[in-house]
Image: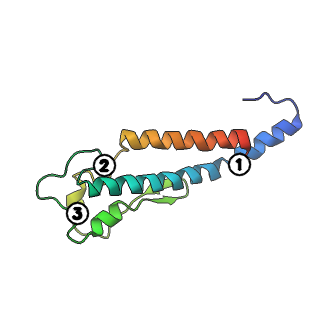
């Protein structure tokens, strides 16, 4: 990071710091897209988001409703969420790992990379 040499540098730093909430929101949007694509690919491959195969007899494709909702991550401000509360049998199926209680390490690594990219562009370019 550059050293602050004058008041203009300080104003530039203040301006860039004021953009942090926007950067967090951009990270959340990109993460939601990544999570949705990853969750959908895993469901189509009949495995949980942690890579474990579905137990025998488990399917998300009878109506497709749970699969659609569990792979539809949304960014809300700087947070990412998916909701399956409108599916009555979701509680039974969630124990098989269709929605994470904690982020899988691959997803966490991807979000870290997105954050580094966004923050470095904020610091270097002032976007």
Q: Quadrant of the N terminus?
A: top right
Q: Residue at x 63, y 41 (%)?
A: 119
Farthest residue to the left: give it: 56
Residue 84 visible in the current orientation: no
Q: Residue at x 51, y 60 (%)?
A: 76
Q: Is residue 77 left or right of residue 93?
A: right
Which label number is shown at residue 49? 2
Distance in Å between CA atoms under marks 1 and 2: 33 Å
Say how many tags the image has: 3
Which label number is shown at residue 127? 1
Q: Residue 118 appears in which quarter of the rendering?
A: top right
Disc 3: which residue: 60
Q: Is residue 56 left or right of residue 115?
A: left
Q: Secondary structure at mark 1?
A: loop
Circle 3 residues within 10 Å: few <14, some 14–19, many ≥20: some
Residue 106 visible in the current orientation: yes
Distance in Å between CA atoms under marks 2 and 3: 13 Å
Q: Is residue 50 left or right of residue 113?
A: left
Q: Residue at x 77, y 40 (%)?
A: 13
């Amino acid at each position: 990071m550059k050293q602050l040499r004058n008041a203009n540098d300080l104003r530039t730093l203040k301006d860039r710091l004021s953009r942090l909430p926007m950067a967090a929101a951009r990270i959340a949007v990109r993460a939601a897209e990544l999570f949705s694509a990853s969750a959908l690919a895993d469901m189509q491959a009949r495995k949980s988001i942690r890579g474990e195969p579905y137990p025998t007899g488990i399917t998300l494709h009878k109506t497709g409703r749970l699969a659609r909702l569990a792979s539809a991550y949304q960014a809300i401000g700087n947070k990412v969420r998916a909701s399956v509360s409108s599916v009555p049998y979701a509680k039974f199926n969630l124990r098989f790992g269709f929605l994470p209680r904690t982020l899988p390490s691959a997803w966490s690594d991807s979000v870290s990379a997105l954050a580094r990219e966004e923050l470095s562009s904020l610091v270097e370019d002032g976007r």
